[in-house]
Image (cartoon, rainbow, N blue to C red):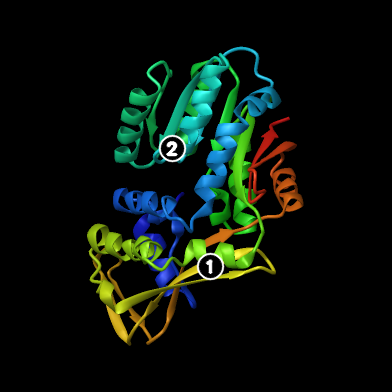
Amino acid sequence: MEKTFAEEVEEGLSANPKFLSSKYHYDDEGSRIFQEIMAMDEYYLTDCEMDIMKNRASEIHRAAGFTGHFNIIELGAGDGLKTKELLRNLLEIGADFTYVPIDISEEAIDLLVKSMNESLPSLKMNPQVGDYFEVMDKIEGQANCPNMVLFLGSNIGNFRPEWAVDILQHMNEHMRSGDKLIIGFDLMKDPNLIRAAYYDSDGITARFNLNLLTRINRELGGNFNIKKFGFYSFYNPANGDVRSFLFSKEQQEVEITATSKSFKFEKDEMIWTELSKKYSLSGIEKLGADAGFQFEKHFLDSNEYFSDTLFAKP
């Protein structure tokens, strides 16, 4: 049985060292802040994936091999800005598909639908709010047509390698033979370029991480004083890990009503909040194979910083 938000917070803040799951970053406010992150000059990932969506859509369609109607199921659609370019190009070449965006944020889906209707009025859509896998099962059962599942934006990099294999295996289990999966991977490259993307001078990434404490206060009855916590991030080019942390600026104790517990923090004690792993091309292929997928092709941006990689379910 999946743990609740309160249970995961209690587990993470009781651990040594402390941690909080990055999946809870994306409430409505977190989703809004992440849009700011994607617009930063330092955050090269958005432009790289946009490059792929704009310039390689027809290649992606040919490689997928779908000749009739298919669904494009996007997990964690967000604002759909990059996906819009893929959809626009697929419509221009006459591809027959229905776009199925899935997000846990109803606000994000509402904004996405409005944006898509304005920009691509001929687009067929079936928007969904909820759990990825529950919605995938529902879509799989509605129509006997193949699916192209999108997991873009380097979201897979937020999972430890063993967890990444696990989530891809879950995707595999909820897909049918012949379905295709496209995953966005940020590639290992100049470490200075990577670090700047996750430790910006304007403090937007810091606000994104600190919002997690605000969410705990609002939803779980916490009494975090946000001003008493700071943010730090670093990149390790040896293993491709970007790790982000919050740290306590002083010795303090925080109560969280939903856990019926209080949690002590030493001065400078860290809370691990996020992993953003960078991959090699061979590492990507191994990850897909470990999850039971068949590798088909890497689609790289013009700088070769990023890959949207196509896999098939055998």
Toward which corner of the image does residue 116 lie, by quadrant?
Answer: top left
Between 255 and 30, the one nearer to me in the picture: 30
| In this picture, residue 166 sits left or right of residue 111 | right
| In this picture, residue 229 sits left or right of residue 84 | left
The first of marks 2 and 1 along the sequence is 2
What percent of the width, then of the height, locates residue 278? 63, 57
Q: Residues within 10 Å of mark 1 (few under 14, many from 20)?
A: some
Between 165 and 72, the one nearer to me in the picture: 72
Rendered residue at 74%/46% (across/down): 285
Between 122 and 240, the one nearer to me in the picture: 122
Regarding mark 2 in the picture, which secondary structure is present there? Answer: helix
Residue located beneath label 1 in the image: 243
Kind of residue indicated by mark 1: Arg
The circle on residue 231 is none
Toward which corner of the image does residue 292 lie, by quadrant?
Answer: top right
Q: Is residue 194 above or below residue 299?
A: below
The circle on residue 81 is 2
Q: CA distance from mark 2 to mark 1?
A: 26 Å
Quick check: marks 2 and 1 in contact, CB under 8 Å?
A: no
What percent of the width, then of the height, locates residue 267? 37, 87
Q: Residues within 10 Å of mark 2 (few under 14, many from 20)?
A: some
Q: Is residue 139 above or below residue 79?
A: above
The number of callouts visible is 2
Q: Is residue 302 above or below residue 248?
A: above
Kind of residue indicated by mark 2: Leu
